[in-house]
Amino acid sequence: MLKQRVITALILLPIALGGFFLLEGGAFALFIAAVVCLGAWEWARLAGFASQALRVTYAGAVAALLYALYLLPQLAPWLLGGAVLWWLLATGLVMTYPKSSRYWGGLPGKLLIGLLILLPAWQGLVLLKQWPQANALIIAVMVLVWGADVGAYFSGKAFGKRKLAPRVSPGKSWEGFFGGLAFSLLLTLVVAVQQGWSVAAVLLGLAGAALVVAASVIGDLTESMFKRQSGIKDSSNLLPGHGGVLDRIDSLTAAIPLFAVLLWLAGWGAL
């Protein structure tokens, strides 16, 4: 398994790095759209589509919506604002699962939720790529999320006792959550000191980082919730040794839209 994971990572890493940091404009939007459509194909399975044709149809519908969003950038504020509201609602759904499953709306509701998860993530990345220091912003949100994952893993392994959401993801603990949060905040503080931020900027940066990290955990738990309901361990086997695309980007689907909204509120770029 380890060998398979390493081989997959070695193949995917240069593709991901090239796509994220070398592509620009429409090519970048298309690259991210391809990743999102693969995620949509996987989500259709979580929603209950067993037929390959129906899963491909859903992915095609997502592709069409992404193209429409690309042609209508004025919809970005509404989409990202809706995403923030969705992730607030998702927090309640995760913390009250399995009772919350009655509010999902069956198959139509699950398909709609897939759109609320996937479309804003694409939109957020496309916007970040257009703003000043675009690649640095993309690196920043990824480091926040991955730093939280690393911190949560080690702190949870060492100190984890109180379960964060036992009916959704029994392996996650509150100690792991706070350990991951602390590590991401430490990374943020290091960057702030190196860049010479003012005290006010540091405080705002730490608050924003905390919100993004919390959102990333909800993103992870939300996918876990739907996988548990569907009786599925991995979203797919597209990435040998790593599961599916959704398994790799679930935290980012929540973190990216919120990160973009917070930067916009801080006056970084225009929506």
Image: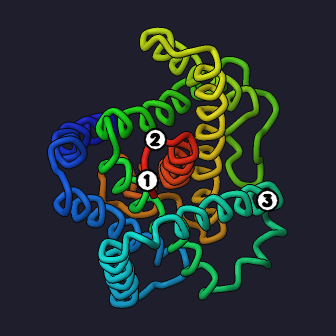
Residue linked to disc 2: 268
The quarter of the image holding the C terminus is bottom left
Q: Label 2 sits on what residue type?
A: Trp
Q: CA distance from mark 1 to mark 3?
A: 30 Å
Q: Quadrant of residue 26?
A: bottom left
Name the residue at 66% across, 40% down.
171
Q: Label 3 sits on what residue type?
A: Gly
Residue 209 percent coordinates (x, y) = 59, 32
Q: Is residue 169 above or below residue 41?
A: above
Q: CA distance from mark 1 to mark 2?
A: 7 Å
Residue linked to disc 3: 92
Q: Label 1 sits on what residue type?
A: Ala
Residue 90 percent coordinates (x, y) = 70, 61
> Mark 1 or mark 3: which is in front?
1
| Residue 55 disc label | none
Element class at badge 3:
helix
Name the residue at 56% across, 24% down.
184
Q: Is residue 4 above or below residue 99?
A: above
Q: How many marks?
A: 3
Tag 1–tag 2 contact (CB < 8 Å): no
Tag 2–tag 3 contact (CB < 8 Å): no
Residue 8 in the figure: left or right of residue 229: left
Name the residue at 22% across, 65% down.
30
Element class at badge 1:
loop
Circle 1 Cα neighbour tier, 10 Å, few/some/many (<14 / 14–19 / ≥20)? some
